Image (tube, grey):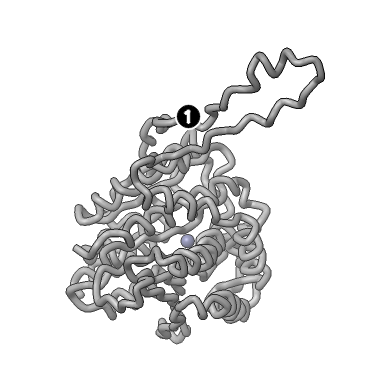
């Protein structure tokens, strides 16, 4: 638990989502490679065009982009992420923000928990196991919600699990005079975007498992208390015994605001996370997800506190996909509404980026679940 102790100490000097951290310049935009997505089959032949009676030309067939022609698993993953439904994500975001606040001291917090459980409960027949972990921090009840899916084979592996997480709590303490128990904290970008993505992953993974495609245990974690300095994820990490059952942990947090470009930050933790960082960068290119730039940043100095951190600092390969609200630069104006009463659904100004973040997260997770445990 020494790593956790260090971690909590670091938390005293930083804020969540890396508020104090300076952005580092992004890498160059990825350029598409491989088959063109605009190849068109030849039109009608000249002989057809020369016939006396006019004919209607057939609609040109557009060749489907195939990122991995010799890899059927890659093609399956592509088809799965293409089915993520932005309208359902939007509906979940609107529901989560309709509870006024998801601050742990506000009545809306329990409504959000009930909503998440209701959505997951509707999928339980696909094999999901829904569990809660309850903890108390300074007299405040916290509840992490977990949805676990075992491989299609029915096996119950003791290791090689993949964790995908988002925090569902919110806060608005940058609004002067804000009262946690009664005032709004809609948390649309931070982090109804990530929470709604996780709910959509639960639907997608249900079909993935039903089709016989899931090869590892995957756990979706809806963490509480991140805005109290990752108290939910930290409490969960403290329950894990070595050797840790997880081979990777992916966190998604604040991914819908950027009105300028489709930029996201990719935080990674310790050298153990470098491989996962590289895989995520490659996934973005392979499947042409189009997060540009995907700005990898080393985060083990404790200045980028997110729910990925407890796992990463403990040595589990761990990344966070997020829009940081650090210093502004040419590709990110900064979400000026974070942690205020104004982080409302209309601030999700880049729904395309939000969907790309979801695709990047799910594709990376699916690749990881395809591989045997280390
Ligand atoms: Zn957040």
Residue of label 1 = 36
Q: Position of residue 143 (x, y in %)?
A: 46, 81
In the rendered picture of this protein, how many numbered marks are placed on residues?
A: 1
Residue 316 to residue 287: above or below: below
Q: Secondary structure at mark 1?
A: loop
Residue 297 to residue 331: above or below: below
Q: Position of residue 59 (x, y in %)?
A: 68, 31
Quadrant in the picture for the C terminus: bottom left
Classify residue 358 as left or right of residue 371: right
Q: Is mark 1 within 8 Å of ligand 1?
A: no
Residue 24 to residue 4: above or below: above
Q: Residue at x 61, y 71 (%)?
A: 101
Mark 1, Cα crowd under 10 Å, few <14 / some 14-19 / many 20+, is some
Q: Residue at x 48, y 52 (%)?
A: 359
Residue closer to the observer: 295 or 370: 370
Residue closer to the observer: 128 or 26: 128
Q: Residue at x 68, y 53 (%)?
A: 346
Residue found at the very far right of the displayed protein: 53
Classify residue 364 as left or right of residue 94: left
Q: Is residue 217 visible?
A: yes
Q: Residue at x 80, y 20 (%)?
A: 54
Residue closer to the observer: 366 or 227: 366
Quadrant in the picture for the N terminus: bottom left
Residue closer to the observer: 39 or 173: 39
Q: Position of residue 198 (x, y in %)?
A: 49, 65
Q: Is residue 18 visible?
A: no
Classify residue 257 as left or right of residue 153: right
């Amino acid at each position: 638990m020494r790593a956790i102790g260090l971690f909590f100490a670091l938390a005293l000097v930083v804020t969540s989502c890396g508020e104090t951290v300076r952005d580092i310049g992004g890498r160059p935009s990825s350029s598409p490679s491989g088959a063109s997505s605009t190849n068109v089959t030849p039109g009608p032949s000249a002989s057809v065009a020369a016939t006396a009676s006019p004919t209607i030309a057939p609609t040109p067939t557009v060749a489907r982009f195939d990122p991995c022609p010799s890899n059927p698993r890659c093609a399956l993953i592509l088809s799965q992420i293409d089915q993520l439904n932005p309208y359902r994500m939007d509906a979940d975001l609107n529901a989560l923000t309709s509870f006024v606040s998801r601050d742990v001291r506000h009545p809306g917090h329990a409504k959000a928990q009930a909503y998440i459980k209701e959505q997951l409960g509707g999928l339980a027949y696909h094999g999901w196991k829904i569990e809660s972990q309850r903890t108390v921090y300074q007299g405040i009840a916290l509840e992490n919600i977990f949805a676990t899916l075992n491989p299609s084979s029915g096996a119950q592996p003791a290791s090689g699990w993949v964790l995908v997480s988002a925090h569902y709590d919110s806060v608005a303490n940058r609004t002067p005079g804000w009262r946690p128990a009664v005032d709004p904290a809609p948390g649309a970008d931070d982090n109804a975007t990530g929470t709604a993505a996780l709910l959509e992953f639960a639907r997608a993974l249900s079909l993935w498992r039903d089709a016989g495609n899931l090869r590892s245990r995957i756990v979706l974690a809806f963490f509480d208390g991140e805005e109290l300095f990752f108290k939910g994820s930290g409490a969960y990490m403290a329950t894990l015994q070595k050797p840790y059952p997880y081979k990777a942990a992916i966190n998604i947090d604040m991914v819908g605001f950027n009105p300028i470009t489709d930029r996201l930050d990719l935080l990674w933790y310790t050298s153990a996370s470098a491989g996962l960082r590289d895989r995520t960068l490659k996934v973005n290119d392979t499947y042409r997800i189009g997060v540009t730039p995907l700005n990898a940043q080393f985060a083990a100095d404790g200045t980028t506190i997110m729910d990925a951190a407890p796992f990463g600092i403990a040595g589990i390969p761990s990344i966070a996909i997020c829009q940081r609200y650090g210093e502004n630069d040419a590709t990110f104006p900064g979400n000026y509404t974070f942690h205020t009463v104004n982080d409302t659904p209309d601030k999700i100004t880049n729904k395309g980026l939000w969907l790309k973040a979801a695709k990047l997260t799910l594709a990376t997770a699916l690749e990881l679940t395809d591989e045997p445990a280390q």
